[in-house]
Image: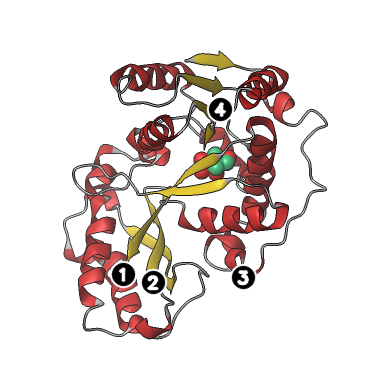
Amino acid sequence: MKQIQKAAELQQAVHQAKDNGLQIGLVPTMGALHEGHLSLIDRALRENDLVVVSLFVNPIQFNNKEDLKKYPRTIEADLELIKNLELRIKNEAQATEVLAFTPSVAEVYPDGEPTEIVYHFGPVEEVMEGPRRPGHFNGVAVVVRRLFDLAQPTRAYFGEKDYQQIAVIRALLEQIKYPIELVPCPIVRADDGLALSSRNMRLSPAARQMAPAINATLEQAAEMSEYEEVDDVKEWVLDTLASYHEVNDCPDGLRFEPEYFEIVDAVTLQPIATWDDAGEHGAVGCIAVWLDGVRLIDIVKF
Ligand code: PAF
C-alpha cells in the first residue's frame, strides 16, 4: 500500500498504469473504515490490477455542518486496515498495488468548493434521502466525478447500504458517459444484524444494543411481504419501530424515531403501490431511523 496525498501524484500513477494496460478499481470512501468498506476493497483487489482507495470526508455532501464536524476521522487506523487486508489476501488478489488517496480539501477542490456545478438526476433523487438532505447527492456526484477523473477506474465499488447513492451514481455515469463499470456490493452486517456504518461508532452502548431491531424488523417485513399488501407492510414497519420503546425495555429513554420507510422499485426507486408494480428487478425497502441522535439507514430486498 502506498499513501498518496497529492492529486497530481495520483494522476501520474494512474497514467502509468493505463499506459501498461492495467485495469484500475476505485473504492471511494470517507474513511472510518469497517468490514463493509474492507469487503469492497477485497473485491476490488480480486478484480483489478491496481486499486485506488480514496479516504476523503467530502464537505460539500454534508447538508448538516454538525454531522460534518462529528464525522469520525481515523486515517492511521484506516491505513493499517488496508495494509492488513492486502497481506491477508495477497495470494488470491489480482492487484499488485493499492494506492490510498488521502487528499486535503484544497487538493480535491483547488478552486474552492464548486458551488456552481448542479446536476439533475430526475426521479431517483427526488425521493427518500433527496428532499430530506438538500444538496447531498449533488455533493456526492461532484466528488465522485472528480475521483473518476483522477483515478480513471475500470470499475468503481459502492456499498448497497447507501442504496439511493448507487442509483444516483448510475444516473451520473449515464450523463457523463464514462466507461466505468459500477459494482454494487452487498451490505455487511454485524453478527446481530446491524448494518455496518461509520456512524455506529456514535451510538451509546445501550443504543448499540437496541439498533439491531431495525434489521430484525426489516427481515420480518420481508416475510410479511409474502402475504400482506405493500401499504400494510410499510405501516407495520413504521409502527413497530416508533412504538418499540412502549413494548420493550429501553434504557435511558431511548426510542426509535423513523424518518421514512419506503418500498420502491429496485432500479427506478419510485414507490410502488402493489408488489406487481416493481419491475423485473424487484422491490427494495429503504429506511432512515433516528436513534440516540444518530441517523441510521438500512435496506431490505423483497
Ligand atoms: O458513500 C460514501 O462514503 C460517500 O458518499 C462517497 C461515495 C465516498 C463520496 O464521498
Is disc 1 placed on a helix, strand or loop?
loop
Pointer 2 with pointer 3, Cβ within 8 A: no
Q: Which residue is at 24% across, 51% downward?
A: 212
Q: Which of disc 1 and disc 3 is earlier in sequence?
A: 3
Q: Amino acid at mark 3?
A: Pro
Q: Please state if 32 lies on the left or on the right of 28 as rendered.
A: left
Q: Which residue is mark 3?
A: 123
Characterize the local packing of mark 3: few (<14), some (14-19) or many (20 or more) Cα atoms within 10 angstroms.
few
Instruction: Where is residue 124? Give x, y as percent.
Output: 58, 66
Q: Which residue is mark 2?
A: 283
Looking at the image, which is closer to me, 264 or 247? 264
Is disc 4 placed on a helix, strand or loop?
loop
Is disc 3 placed on a helix, strand or loop?
helix
Instruction: Where is residue 242? Give x, y as percent.
Output: 32, 67
Look at the picture and state if 185 lies above or below 242. above
Look at the picture and state if 77 lies above or below 276. above
Q: Nearer the viewer, mark 3 or mark 4?
A: 4
Q: Please state if 208 lies on the left or on the right of 167 as rendered.
A: left
Pointer 1 with pointer 2, Cβ within 8 A: yes
Look at the picture and state if 64 lies above or below 152. below
Q: Which of disc 3 and disc 2 is earlier in sequence?
A: 3
Q: Which of disc 2 and disc 4 is earlier in sequence?
A: 4
Characterize the local packing of mark 4: few (<14), some (14-19) or many (20 or more) Cα atoms within 10 angstroms.
some
Characterize the local packing of mark 2: few (<14), some (14-19) or many (20 or more) Cα atoms within 10 angstroms.
many
| Cα separation between marks 4 and 1 | 38 Å
Q: Which residue is at 35% across, 76% downward?
A: 234
Pointer 4 with pointer 2, Cβ within 8 A: no
Q: Please state if 13 lies on the left or on the right of 162 as rendered.
A: right
Q: Determine which of the numbered discs, if any, sits on residue 302 in the image.
A: 1
| Cα separation between marks 2 and 3 | 16 Å
Instruction: Where is residue 236? Give x, y as percent.
Output: 28, 76
Q: Is mark 4 within 8 Å of ligand 1?
A: no
